[in-house]
Image: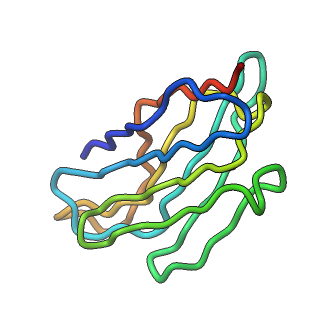
């Protein structure tokens, strides 16, 4: 199973970016999916999560600016980031709780990370 993230880049303050993360491989089912970020010298923190049914949860610093969504048919999670600030600069990691075919229990998987830089 692999999680492939894309969509990062350099954007000016106030701008927008959309991240995508697609899961592939021998997947039986996917439960929660989400995004975390890690800025240089800081611990990894929650950005947003979304359940299979669409219930969402956001980190305090991104509420009202970021929107998480998913396409269950495509095993893909998205993060629409608006009104970006320099403090949003970080490596963004996608995460998914996946049950692979032939297994009994799901386990967490992580994508490779995509850099988001907000700077003028």
> What residue is rendered at 64% in x and 37% in y?
37
Q: How is the image coloured?
A: rainbow
Q: Position of residue 76 (x, y in %)?
A: 34, 59
Q: Position of residue 73 (x, y in %)?
A: 24, 72
Q: Nearer the viewer, residue 61 or 107?
A: 61
Decide: is 112 above or below 3. above
Q: Position of residue 98 (x, y in %)?
A: 36, 60
Q: Nearer the viewer, residue 28 or 49?
A: 49
* Quarter of the figure that contains the C terminus: top right
Query: With 34 as the anchor, is 73 left or right in this view?
Result: left
The image shows a total of numbered marks equal to 0
> What residue is rendered at 17% in x and 51% in y?
25
Can you name the residue that lies furthest to the right here?
60
Q: Nearer the viewer, residue 108 or 16?
A: 16
Decide: is 9 above or below 68. above
Can you name the residue that lies furthest to the bottom here?
53
Q: Position of residue 95 (x, y in %)?
A: 48, 49
Q: Quadrant of residue 40?
A: top right
Query: With 101 as the anchor, is 97 left or right in this view?
Result: right
Decide: is 4 above or below 9. below
Q: Quadrant of residue 14?
A: top right
> What residue is rendered at 33% in x and 43% in y?
3
């Amino acid at each position: 199973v692999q999680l492939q993230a894309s969509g990062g880049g350099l954007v000016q303050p106030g701008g927008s970016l959309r991240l995508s993360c697609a899961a592939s491989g021998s997947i039986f089912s996917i439960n929660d999916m989400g995004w975390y970020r890690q800025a240089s010298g800081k611990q990894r923190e929650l950005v947003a999560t979304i359940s299979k049914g669409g219930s969402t949860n956001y980190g305090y610093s991104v509420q009202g600016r970021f929107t998480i969504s998913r396409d269950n048919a495509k095993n893909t999670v998205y993060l629409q980031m608006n009104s970006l600030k320099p403090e949003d600069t970080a490596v963004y990691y996608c995460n998914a709780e996946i049950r692979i075919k032939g297994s009994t229990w799901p386990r967490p998987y992580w994508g490779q990370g995509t850099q988001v830089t907000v700077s003028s």
